[in-house]
Image: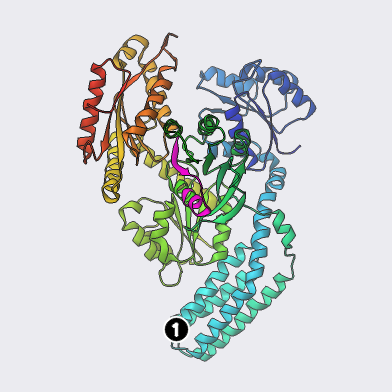
Amino acid sequence: MGNTILLADADHQLVTMLKSLLTGRGYVTSQEESGRAVLEHIGKERPSLVIIGEQLTDIDGIGLIVKIRKSYPDVKLAFISNEWREADLYQQLTKDFRVELIVHRPLKPSLFAAQIDSQLRHQQAIRIAAGSEQEEKTFLTLRSRFAEVLPTRLSLISDAIELATTNSTNKDLTAEARRLAHNLKGTASSCGFNLVGEAASHLERAIVQIQNNGFDDVLAAWSEVMLLFEAVSHQAQVELKNNIPTQSQLDKLADDSAMAKVLLVGSEFFSEGKEALQSGLPIKVIAASSPHDALNKATATVLDAVIIDMDTAPQESINLARDLRGITGYESLPLAFISKGAAPEDRIATTHAGASIFLDKPINTNTLNQGIEYLLGVRGGGRHRVLVIDDDEDFSTIIAHALGKEGMLVKVLNDPTGVMQAMENFLPDLVLLDVMMPGISGFEVCRRLRGTSRWQDVPILFLTAETELDARLAAFDAGGDDYLPKPVAPVELLTRVKVRLERARLLRDRADRDILSGLLLRRAFMEQLNALISEAERYKLVFSLALLDVDHFKKVNDTYGHLAGDRVLSHLGQLLKRRFRVEDLRGRWGGEEFIVAFRHEGKETTIGALHRVLEELKSTEFSGDHGEIFNVSFTAGMSSYPDDGRTLEDLVHVSDQRLYLGKECGRSRIIGNG
């Protein structure tokens, strides 16, 4: 059993996350919740690795490690600890019990996966064989597609060369012939047509030579170009005779990893399928017939949005939304509800559960697609988004497949003139950019993005077959962050993209996020609130603002300890993050004060949703530094735009006044008027 991993833990959320992560990398996983079951499993079927957590039903994780080592001295072990331990314990685990990897929660998925890969590297032949199925899917699909379009691409090059030959003084025609040869060079090699790619490289160099020589002695030069083109055609015929997968084979290997996945729950109007939205983003619609079915499908794939029909069972639907947002990695999952005629209290409950939009029945395909577009445009976590800008459709497909398999959401733009609209609609976390494109070069696109304040910090990586020093330097001069030559090695591409995304996230979080609560810092919140005010003013929209203060927080610190106080602030931050909609703004205003802005919602709805959060907090038991149990509450004041003010200062002032009114009235309440 080459690449099997046994997960020994009773924490269902942790195990679900690990299964999704590891199966996506080609490992076969299984789970046991008790120490006895783990020992029996190892006795019957020896796994490549046992990953042990702390939460088993009959024994703790360290105790299980001791038992495994007594009976099975050669089994590879990894341990997930809930907290940092004493150095002596780590030495005992690694030296005496030969635990090969110790990691700590919360796990960072990409880093954890790399550590597991490293531990099983000695079984690399097996690992590659297991993982090669995914690679084969991509490779066969791309090879087949390229085989279909190769004759057309050769015909286009032939026509371009003929036009350039008969109009030898027309530099634009020569440039077009070079561009087509250049694209063929990069794409053919990446699709496995190495001989075609090499021959196309010689063809491009010959055309470049004509450009560099000022079009002297063009007849002889173009004759050489025609001979080189014949060589390209010959190599294409040779490679097309090799095994090209049939359509039935490709149907079995169909890949949807780069698509946005939308779960539609509980309506006869919904059906599964794949389509493209008006923005061009490909989506896969997944239908679920019940909450149980929805949760199973949510843990089996990576979702980007969920739409729930709540007419049959309103409370079950709301509970499902909360359960989905409770799954690790789905804390910011965009949600929507549809209903024929929901009661006002149901709409308050859906806002509390995190619904970004509410769609009224009857609902048609166009309205549904608009709702999906909105949900996928909401930014607040979820999958990394990568925009690929390249005029070569086949090469773009290669990149989209490779990145999609790593869980990224990919949009391809083959016409660079639409870059600004694509940026606004898709909101990418990173841009992959070709250099040679018709009309507008990649350098110009990069300069345009860097000249726009909103996109000054987005990572931009150049991908091109231009490998000369001048081209590489020009990429950085234009504002690029990195440079990769075509044909691209998938491993290098993925590594560089991941590093850039992670670095950008760290810098963004360090500048904008409060470490304790995970919410926006005051400065970052004010910037986003000002943007919300501008949007509301421009489109005549409303929104509401709530200022929260933890009641008697100084007493919590003095009585139960400062660490207990930190736990209260951290929990409230996470509660605010899990509740409400993805697009609502949440921040730590300072000390024990928090602030929330509800986009496009007045106080009438949001005050009820905030009351539910207050009740949740009041029912939560906290532990003091010495084991004492205590509860807390908060008081909040609310204001609305534009009724209570049109500036940030006015809205915060009104909310603050109502907050103190709430304290004077006895605390543990929300004041929206007065």
Is residue 12 placed above or below 182 in the rendered structure? above
Marker count (numbered): 1
The answer to whether 1 is drawn above or below residue 180 in the figure is: above
Q: Which residue is drawn at 58% across and 48% down?
A: 285
Does residue 148 sit above or below 28 in this rendering?
Answer: below
Q: Which amino acid lies under the numbered mark 1 shown in the image of this protein? A: Asn
Name the residue tied to disc 1. 213
- Within the magenta stretch, is there residue 355? yes
Q: What stretch is highlighted in magenta?
A: 354-371
Q: Which of 423 and 188 is in front in this view?
A: 423
For this view, does 593 lie left or right of residue 315? left
Instruction: Work out whether residue 112 can be spotted.
Output: yes
Q: Magenta includes 99?
A: no
Identify which residue, 23 or 197, lies in the foreground: 23
Rendered view: 462 above or below 643: below
Seen at 27% across and 51% down, the residue is 538
- Position of 195 with respect to 515 (left or right) is right
Task: List x then y, in percent, for residue 378.
Answer: 43, 45
